[in-house]
Amino acid sequence: MGDLPKGDISVSDLHTSMLQEIVGSGASDSLLHSYQRSFNGFVAKLTQAEKQKIAGMKGVVSVFPSQKKKLHTTRSWDFMGFPQNVTRSTTESDIIVGMLDTGIWPESESFNDTGYGPPPAKWKGTCQQSSNFTCNNKIIGARYYYSEGRIDPPDFPSPRDSEGHGSHTASTAAGNVVSQASMLGLATGTARGGVPSARIAVYKICWAFGCTDADILAA
């Protein structure tokens, strides 16, 4: 629906009201997520006929299905021509890298916060802690998003990485320098991120089946 409405207007109430015009009293059950920070929009369970009605309403820019994406990996910074000995700025620790992936494994040496001060004052996010997850001064924020209903094994309701992909990409982007890293003793070298002193805010939106557009947009 484009930009957020001006003035003191409840965006979620606006979305619910629109759905009530289409599905009646079942609007609250149909609404999966209301986007009200970066843009104006919502996710809802609709029939094809209901979708067509919504698409014709005033103020609606587009209506499209929430599809599932597949995970892909990355290449190394050396391959990209960004060597480890590049001149670095002392303000790197004020950079916050947002990672949208399968979560993160906080015990990894790539995310050790030794020598880090508290998060930058500009940081306004939160850490969604659970019995198997806590943040530190390297991983300063974490949340998970799941719009598919109940979370079944092997997945679990936590920002912790259950696939390994998110920890890999987070360390590739902003992992600390880890010397003598190897794969079972092979290819020993230094593992590091592109901006190793930066902080990380992780948003877990990918699960065993993949990543839905609804959760990607929510994050």
Image (cartoon, rainbow, N blue to C red):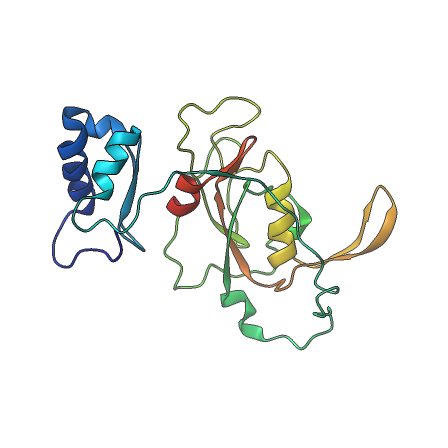
* Residue 180: percent from left, percent from top: 82, 53
Residue lying at 58% horizontally and 24% vertically, measured from the top left: 154
Is residue 112 shown to the viewer in this render?
no
Furthest residue toward right: 186
Q: Is residue 54 above or below residue 149?
A: below
Residue lying at 55% horizontally and 54% vertically, measured from the top left: 138
* Residue 181: percent from left, percent from top: 79, 51
Horizontal side, residue 22 vs residue 157: left or right: left
Is residue 194 shown to the viewer in this render?
yes
Q: Is residue 12 above or below residue 148?
A: below
* Residue 168: percent from left, percent from top: 65, 47
Q: Is residue 173 above or below residue 70?
A: below
The front one of 173 and 117 is 173
Residue lying at 84% horizontally and 41% vertically, measured from the top left: 184
The front one of 194 and 111 is 194
Q: Quadrant of residue 106?
A: top right
Horizontal side, residue 4 vs residue 17: left or right: right
* Residue 37: percent from left, percent from top: 29, 53
Q: Is residue 112 above or below residue 107?
A: below
Residue lying at 49% horizontally and 34% vertically, measured from the top left: 158
The number of numbered discs placed on residues in the rendered structure image is 0
Q: Quadrant of residue 172?
A: bottom right
